[in-house]
Image (cartoon, rainbow, N blue to C red):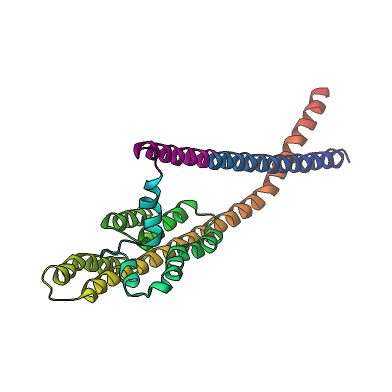
Amino acid sequence: DTHTHHTQPTTATATTNTTTDTTTSTARTTRNACISYTIYMLYVFWYLVSALMLFAGLHVASFFVEGRSWAYLDACVSAVWEVRDLTPNLGVFWYIFTEVFERFRPLFVIVFQCHLLMYTVPLTMRMKNLPLPLACTFAAFVCLFQPYPTVTDFSLMLTLMLAHWPAVQECKFFTFMLSGACVGLAMFPVMASLWLDRNTGNANFAYNMQLAHHVFCSFLLAEWLKSVLVCERRDAATEFCQDIVRDVVAAMDAPQAETHAQICADRHTEEPKVAAH
């Protein structure tokens, strides 16, 4: 009877301590999540403030450099938006806007300049847990679909992809797509020279090489993006399995911990009796 009388309070005490530890751990986790979210929002706020201050400073400096004139906005913003310069380049704008009728030009300008906005919401919702690959994806889209891309933009896009090496290793056709993009890039100046310098070709020569480069770059970006999502799913599955294993091990260790606590309590209870005898 004495053993039963001392065992029941010990078990209740162990259960109470376990519940208290669980509640404390949950509260600590919630507090840490709130602190992390607050720090993140402060970082975003100060980043936006810094970016706005930087752009405002650049505009003010340009205004004074141009002799207190806003004419630079027409050359740097309006001209790029309206695609006034149709010199052959690595973009798809110059050929399309050369062939299009003038009355349809505003429609094509809006479609070509604003179609990137349709990717922002779906990609942000799908990759909300991958902020760095999401930022690299948006930067790659801008490099690829701007009116006047250069070799530097292609190099930047490729560098952003290679920065995520596990995703590159997951790609099945990365080397093939990259080779096709490099071939189109290398052949573009040759075809442009045949058309503009030697007069032995036409605009389709240069545009076909540019289009090949653009298509291979698009497939390369799509393949890389798919690999990023595959790596994310694999990491999530691995973490899920690890959590299950931890829970199973904790459940197996819990009875042993309770038994050990009961034995220790019984020893502490018997020690005063031995001392009394």
The one of 1 and 25 positioned closer to us in this rendering: 25
Given the current orientation, which residue lies at the most extreme left position?
Answer: 198
> For the magenta stretch, what is the residue range?
46-69
The one of 43 and 273 positioned closer to us in this rendering: 43
Q: Quadrant of residue 23?
A: top right
- Count of labels in the image: 0
Say whether residue 207 is left or right of residue 73.
Answer: left
On the image, the x and y values in percent for residue 57 come to 43, 37
Q: Quadrant of the N terminus?
A: top right
The one of 101 and 132 positioned closer to us in this rendering: 101
Question: Is 17 above or below relative to 106?
Answer: above
On the image, the x and y values in percent for residue 234 come to 49, 61
Residue drawn 85% across and 42% down? Answer: 4
Is 13 part of what is drawn in magenta? no
Say whether residue 252 is left or right of residue 94.
Answer: right
Say whether residue 259 is left or right of residue 46.
Answer: right
Is 63 part of what is drawn in magenta? yes
Residue drawn 76% across and 31% down? Answer: 268
Residue drawn 47% across and 41% down? Answer: 51
Q: Quadrant of the C terminus?
A: top right
Residue drawn 47% across and 63% down? Answer: 114
Residue 2 visible (yes or no): yes
